[in-house]
Image (cartoon, grey):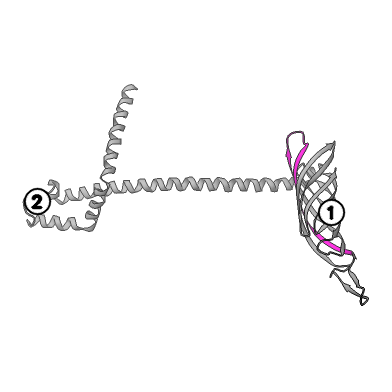
């Protein structure tokens, strides 16, 4: 084995030196490639055969026969092909690495989507529905434009997802100042939990909701001009008006006692930008 190691080591050393020398004459190789590819060599060869090139001009001995020229040309083209193939091989290698990376990423996304779909499918299966549990929350949201209570009631289909209905009362004060507009809000929501730790004391959550609001009372819609006694309309809202809303309420859930939790976090909704605080079980 030592003899084989020494032999291979010598061959590799010679090969490395040869490759190094080969790389140093790349410019000459390109010039020769252009010369042989242009057909100029054939004209020079025919001139040499006809005795038109002076005797003192240096020429390789094997150029005196067309077979030698063709042999040299073939060797040159083979070396060039090997060099170009080496470049292409490196390009293809990096391309394949990128494609494999993209493929792995796409496969991961596909696996995540498949896992997500299978989770929903199981949650609504006969076996999955046996694990459903009710979940209720009561919270107060306040911020710019709107404030008021909100109640949610839904089904927790697993330890990460809850969906259900919501109902609340909104008091639109800033946008209607000096009047106050009261509305009933109803909609549907989806809650996603991100648990922290094994004891399930803390968890992040994200509520997404859509629904509609109906105005049932407007206070201060008119004010009286004391000089003329005329009533002047202050706001354009009227009982019976309605609008659609969308809301996102992320936050932190903290387990206080058994299944009783505290909810708190920001509120970003169509007519409310502020925060919310509530409790639920």
Residue sitting at 42 percent across and 48 percent down? 92
Residue sitting at 78 percent across and 36 percent down? 201
Foreground residue, 230 or 141? 230
Say if 59 sits above or below 258 in the image.
Answer: below
Q: Which residue is mark 1?
A: 166
Q: Quadrant of the C terminus?
A: top right
Horizontal side, residue 42 vs residue 273: left or right: left
Q: Quadrant of the N terminus?
A: top left
Foreground residue, 198 or 145? 145
Residue that sits furthest to the front in the current view: 227
Residue that sits furthest to the top in the current view: 2
Q: Which residues are magenta?
A: 194-216
Q: Which residue is mark 2?
A: 57
Residue that sits furthest to the bottom in the current view: 228
Q: CA distance from mark 2 to mark 1?
A: 100 Å
Horizontal side, residue 119 vs residue 150: left or right: left
Assign a secondary structure to mark 2: loop
Assign a secondary structure to mark 1: strand
Horizontal side, residue 118 vs residue 175: left or right: left
Say if 29 sits above or below 254 in the image.
Answer: below
């Amino acid at each position: 084995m030592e003899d084989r190691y020494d032999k291979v080591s010598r061959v590799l050393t010679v090969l490395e030196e040869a490759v190094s020398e080969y790389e140093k004459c790349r410019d000459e190789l390109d010039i020769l490639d252009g010369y042989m590819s242009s057909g100029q060599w054939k004209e020079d060869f025919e001139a040499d055969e006809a005795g038109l090139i002076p005797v003192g001009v240096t020429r390789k001995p094997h150029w005196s026969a067309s077979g030698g020229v063709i042999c040299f040309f073939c060797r040159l083209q083979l070396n060039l092909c090997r060099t170009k193939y080496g470049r292409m091989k490196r390009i293809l290698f990096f391309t394949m690495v990128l494609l494999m990376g993209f493929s792995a990423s796409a496969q991961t996304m596909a696996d995540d989507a498949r896992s997500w779909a299978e989770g929903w499918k199981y949650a609504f299966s006969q076996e999955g529905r046996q694990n459903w549990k009710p979940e209720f929350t009561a919270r107060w949201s306040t911020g710019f434009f709107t404030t008021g209570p909100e109640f949610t009631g839904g089904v927790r289909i697993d330890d990460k997802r809850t969906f259900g209905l919501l109902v609340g009362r909104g008091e639109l004060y800033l946008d209607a100042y000096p009047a106050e507009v009261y509305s009933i809000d109803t909609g549907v929501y989806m809650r996603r939990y991100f648990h922290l730790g094994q004891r399930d004391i803390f968890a992040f959550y994200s509520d997404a909701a859509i629904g509609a609001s109906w105005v049932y009372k407007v206070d201060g819609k008119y004010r009286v001009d004391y000089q003329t006694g005329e009533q002047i309309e202050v706001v354009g809202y009227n009982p019976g008006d309605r609008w659609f809303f969308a809301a996102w309420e992320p936050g932190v859930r903290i387990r206080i006692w058994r299944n009783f939790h505290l909810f708190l976090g920001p509120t970003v909704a169509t007519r409310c930008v502020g925060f919310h605080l509530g409790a639920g079980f």
